[in-house]
């Protein structure tokens, strides 16, 4: 019989030989997934694995060795302390994206405010759902042009029991959005087309290109977002947009050309400006 210690040693060695830098961590996470445990609460190293568990772990390691993201293999990713279902066809939530939610919660501290929230290019729905979880009187509209991505969002809305507070719409934001909103989120594609090939294999070969490729200069999505935000933001509304490294001033110019202003740029935990807060120019009425 194979012990957990033996299986972990073999898995780590296999991942290292495949060039996976996070081999030890990934092996631990995948072993926990197979055992129905948590990565920080694995059973005793002397635990005897069943044949089925060995086969399942070997398959998970094979997929990871081929570059597939760990989150796609486990089917889950944590974001803002919440569990989200993810898989092929949807962008995997990143820790740095939590900056957008944090800033919106600071700007709208009232937990009983009936806020209207819009998420443009919602993907897994992580931004909208994380905000709704902290603001129980808020309601949301999630928009994505990808049917695959919106299905993942739908799964997460149901999982967190927000179906009565969240509407899903399969649409292209460039066609506009009806109504006015207090809070708008978007994590648009912002990587320059020429830099896609430089991304890690698990990103460029597995995650949806439409959620990554921001055009020749990385700003295409912001250009299409600007007029939509101008029409959708309420008088006192704010939009929270994720940006790439070094894009702060360029995005501010794009927003300014549509009659909007970047009120502030907020760094992530690595000190990189990650979120721009966009408002209407002038004082609210």
Image (tube, grey):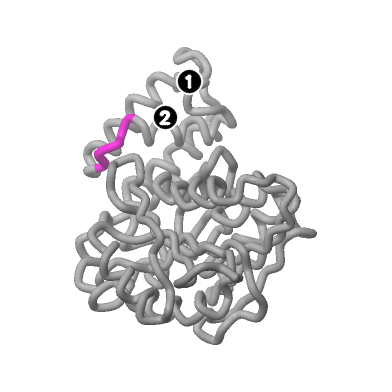
Q: CA distance from mark 1 to mark 2?
A: 19 Å
Nearer the observer, 177 or 68: 177
Nearer the observer, 124 or 101: 101
Above or below 34: residue 188? below
Inspect the magenta stretch and tell me whether residue 182 lies in it. no
Quadrant where the C terminus is found in the figure: bottom right
Q: Quadrant of residue 196?
A: bottom left
Q: Residue at x 56, y 28 (%)?
A: 37
* Dominant secondary structure of the residues highlighted in magenta in the image: loop
User: Which residues, given as a range, are shown in magenta?
Assistant: 20-24
Can you give x and y, in whole percent of width and height, for residue 154 in the image?
Answer: 66, 61
Q: Which residue is mark 2?
A: 28
- Could you tell me if residue 69 is visible in this image? yes
Nearer the observer, 223 or 129: 223
Above or below 119: residue 178? below
Instruction: Please name which of the two marks, 1 or 2, marks the residue nearer to the observer.
Output: 2
Above or below 253: residue 205? above
Q: Residue at x 44, y 65 (%)?
A: 278
Q: Residue at x 22, y 43 (%)?
A: 19
Q: Quadrant of residue 13?
A: top left
- Image side of residue 209 versus residue 231, left or right: left
Can you give x and y, in whole percent of width and height, for residue 131 in the image?
Answer: 61, 50
Above or below 144: residue 203? above
Q: Residue at x 23, y 60 (%)?
A: 246
Inspect the magenta stretch and tell me whether residue 23 lies in it. yes
Mark 2 crowd level (few <14, some 14–19, many ≥20, 10 Å Cα)? many
Q: Which residue is mark 1?
A: 1
């Amino acid at each position: 019989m194979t012990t957990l210690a033996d299986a972990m040693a073999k898995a780590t060695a296999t991942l290292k030989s495949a060039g996976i830098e996070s081999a030890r961590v990934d092996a631990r996470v995948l072993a926990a997934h197979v055992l129905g445990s948590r990565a920080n609460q694995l059973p005793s190293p002397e635990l005897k694995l069943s044949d089925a568990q060995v086969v399942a772990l070997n398959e998970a390691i094979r997929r990871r060795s081929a570059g597939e993201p760990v989150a796609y293999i486990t089917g889950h990713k944590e974001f803002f302390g919440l569990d989200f279902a993810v898989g092929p066809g949807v962008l995997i939530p990143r820790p740095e994206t939590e900056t957008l939610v944090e800033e919106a919660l600071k700007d709208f501290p009232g937990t009983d405010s009936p806020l209207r929230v819009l998420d443009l290019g919602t993907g897994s729905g992580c931004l909208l759902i994380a905000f709704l979880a902290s603001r129980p009187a808020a309601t949301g509209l999630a928009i994505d042009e990808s049917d695959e991505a919106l299905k993942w969002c739908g799964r997460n809305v149901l999982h967190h029991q927000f179906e009565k507070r969240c509407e899903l719409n399969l649409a292209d934001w460039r066609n506009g959005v009806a109504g006015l909103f207090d809070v708008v989120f978007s994590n648009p594609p912002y990587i320059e087309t020429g830099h896609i090939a430089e991304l890690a294999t698990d990103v460029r070969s597995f995650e949806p290109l439409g959620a990554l490729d921001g055009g020749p200069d990385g700003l295409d999505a912001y250009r299409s977002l600007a007029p939509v935000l101008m029409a959708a933001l309420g008088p006192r509304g704010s939009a929270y947009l994720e940006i790439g490294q070094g894009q702060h001033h360029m995005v501010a110019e794009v927003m300014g050309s549509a009659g909007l202003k970047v009120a502030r740029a907020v760094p992530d935990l690595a000190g990189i400006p990650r979120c721009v807060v966009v408002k209407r120019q002038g004082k609210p009425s």
